[in-house]
Image (tube, rainbow, N blue to C red):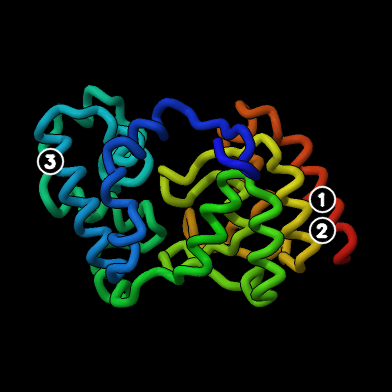
Amino acid sequence: MSQGEQPVYVCEQVREVERLHRDLLTDTVRRLPIRDQLDRQANRILDAHQAGDRAIVPQITCWHPRLACHSADDIMNSAFTPDDARQTIAREYGFTDWLHAAAEGGDPPDADFELAVDTLLRGDVETLRVLLAGDPRLIHRRSRYGHRSTLLHYVGSNGVETYRQRVPLNLAEITRLLVEAGADVNAPANMYGGGSTTLGLLATSDHPAKAGVTDDVRKVLEEAAARRR
């Protein structure tokens, strides 16, 4: 762990998804257009299904339009096509389907925003503070992925990229920093059909609960929401 980083809770399923896609999550790949990145990840999911690698189960059971909520055995024993893989990854990244991802994903992600997300999820408060001070507009920027999350939405550890559903144990401190920098606690994002707020995402996510930080983060968000009334 480098200086500035904090302990981070990551469940085994998320670790497995990260393992499966690790070489597709590098800075070099993330400079590609979004649709090209997602196409590579879709191919990885397809190959893993054919190889019997159950690391893909969390992505499919959460995001595939037909296999959502199915058991691991059902998923691994089902026919699975390239289109199935593309639909899964498109929906995971907040697009309605692959056609939507292909149409809207012609640009690469916002590199400054992505760096801030990575910094947040490492629990590196001081580096995040520097990034926000260097670009005050960053707090209001949104992901170029289909879910269109702000930095604050990543606090909810829910509805964003599976490999990013990780929880630094100082998440309440990070949340307070984002709020003090001007984050809108009532801002909606597009996951789960739209209208998702950070409080709603937090309340329905297992990850912060298992990390033991839900109550502290909720308190910061609720206090911020009360001040905006």
Relative placement, left or right, of 125 versus 104 is right
Q: 21 or 129, which is in the foreground?
A: 129
* Looking at the image, residue 195 lies above or below residue 165: below
What residue is shown at x 33% (from left), y 76% (from top)? 107
Mark 2 → mark 1, Cα distance in angstroms: 5 Å
153 above or below 16?
A: below
Residue closer to the observer: 6 or 100: 6
Amino acid type, mark 1: Glu
What secondary structure is found at the residue carrying circle 2?
helix
Does label 1 or label 3 sit earlier along the sequence?
3
Q: Quadrant of residue 76?
A: top left
- Tally of numbered tags: 3
Is residue 194 something that shows in the picture?
no
Q: Please, what secondary structure does the residue beneath circle 3 have?
A: helix
Dot 1 crowding, Cα within 10 Å, few <14, some 14–19, many 20+: few
Which residue does the numbered mark 1 point to in the structure image? 222
Decide which of 65, 143 is in the foreground and name it.
143
Residue, disc 3: 47
**Left or right of 11, for residue 85:** left
Quarter the N terminus occupies: top right
